[in-house]
Amino acid sequence: MPELPEVETVRLGLQPAMEGRKFLRVEQRRPDLRFPLPERFSERLVGRRLLSLERRAKYLVGVVEGGDILAMHLGMTGRFDVTTSKRAGQPGEFAHAQGGIPAHDHVVFHMEGGARVTYNDVRRFGFMLLIPGAERETHALFRGLGVEPLGPDLTPEYLALRARGKKADLKAFLLDQRVIAGLGNIYVCEALFRTRLNPTKSASVLATKTGLPNAHTQRLVPEIRAILQAALQAGGSTLRDYRQADGALGYFQHSFLAYGREGEMCQAPQCKSLIKRRVQSGRSTFYCPTCQK
DNA sequence: AAGCGAACCTGGCTGC
DNA sequence: TGCAGCCAGGTTCGCT
């Protein structure tokens, strides 16, 4: 479930269980996720405190006592479940007590305070790395990332400068984490629908010839912020049964206007067109061919 | 150099 | 019922 609002929701769910607490035990049930898990993973965490759990783009960034950064990415299907002793006896707990380890539970952090934090990832596109704290800004994972869409750096001026002369289509441009870090397929579709911009247009429509913002950029930037904020408020979007760390479901998926609505009537006032689906950058784009010019 | 498609992996759903 | 084919919230690699 992981675009920015989902990752941030996960972070908020994990914070009370992990932040300021020591790792008591780390179970690693396979050698790798997308990448090999860190050398001596358990030894480098156990006995240390997680000083803070932060987020950059779609990464969870844990600052570990002693200097390491625990960088975690959820890929497509990564999720965390938090179980505390108070919740013992719930369905997952029961299955566990029966002796079965749920499929795809790959890593379990046993935290001081009694929380068991389980990382589950069916497709294993997610990963965990330990990187020296000194490399927090310079490490390849973070170096090339673009601006945080909810921070002060995403401005029409910035976006216009980056879009100037770009031939890639708007969809690919907004998905590019080197430009804006945290948008994914859903929120790009939704932001473009709400801004009435056609995803197949060249990104250069966001800038004047000299790289200055135009009316499109001025509408798009606030729309990106608004949709992410709204999704955040709703606890993110839940597709295919995924849950927040506390077991709750996000509900922003009910607010999608375009994503996943192929063949349905466009919801814009007066518009009688049907939402279309096409593939761009290998991903489904949902859009209204009439509203989005 | 930018900009594509393919690859990574598993599972759910659709249609024959 | 079985099986092939398509699809899925992301990122990276390698080829034009």
Image: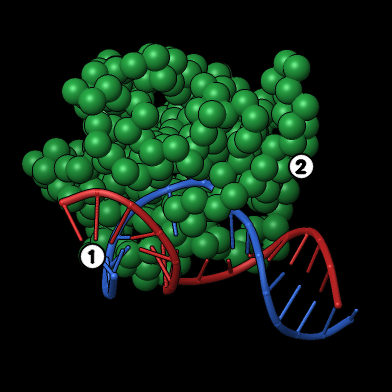
Chain colours: A green, B red, C blue
Marks 1 and 2: in contact by CB < 8 Å?
Answer: no
Residue for point 55% across, 24% down:
A196
- The subunit letter for the residue under badge 1 reads A
Indicate which disc, 2 or 1, sits on the residue closer to the N terminus. Answer: 1
What's the mark number on residue A263? 2
Picture quarter containing residue A158?
A: top left
Report helix, strand or loop for mark 1. loop
Which residue, as the protein is rendered here, is positioned at the far left?
A: A134
Q: What residue type is labelled 2?
A: Gly
Residue A57 location, x and y as percent?
34, 36
Residue for point 46% across, 62% down:
A124
Residue A214 location, x and y as percent?
34, 16
Residue for point 55% across, 53% down:
A279
- The subunit letter for the residue under badge 2 reads A
Give the crowd class for mark 1: few <14, some 14-19, many >=20 residues within 10 Å.
few
Residue for point 23% across, 52% down:
A130
Question: Residue A39 or A240: which is nearer the viewer?
Answer: A240
Does A244 sit left or right of A274 as displayed? left
Residue A17 location, x and y as percent?
45, 34
Q: Is residue A136 in sight in this rendering?
A: yes
Question: Residue A245 or A230: which is nearer the viewer?
Answer: A230
Q: Provide the residue designation for mark 1.
A: A39
Question: Residue A168 or A49: which is nearer the viewer?
Answer: A168
Q: Which amino acid does label 1 sit on?
A: Glu
Q: Is residue A49 in sight in this rendering?
A: no
Residue A272 location, x and y as percent?
77, 27
Does A14 sit left or right of A101 as displayed? left
The quadrant of the picture occupied by the N terminus of chain A is: top right
Q: In this view, does B8 lie above or below A194?
A: below
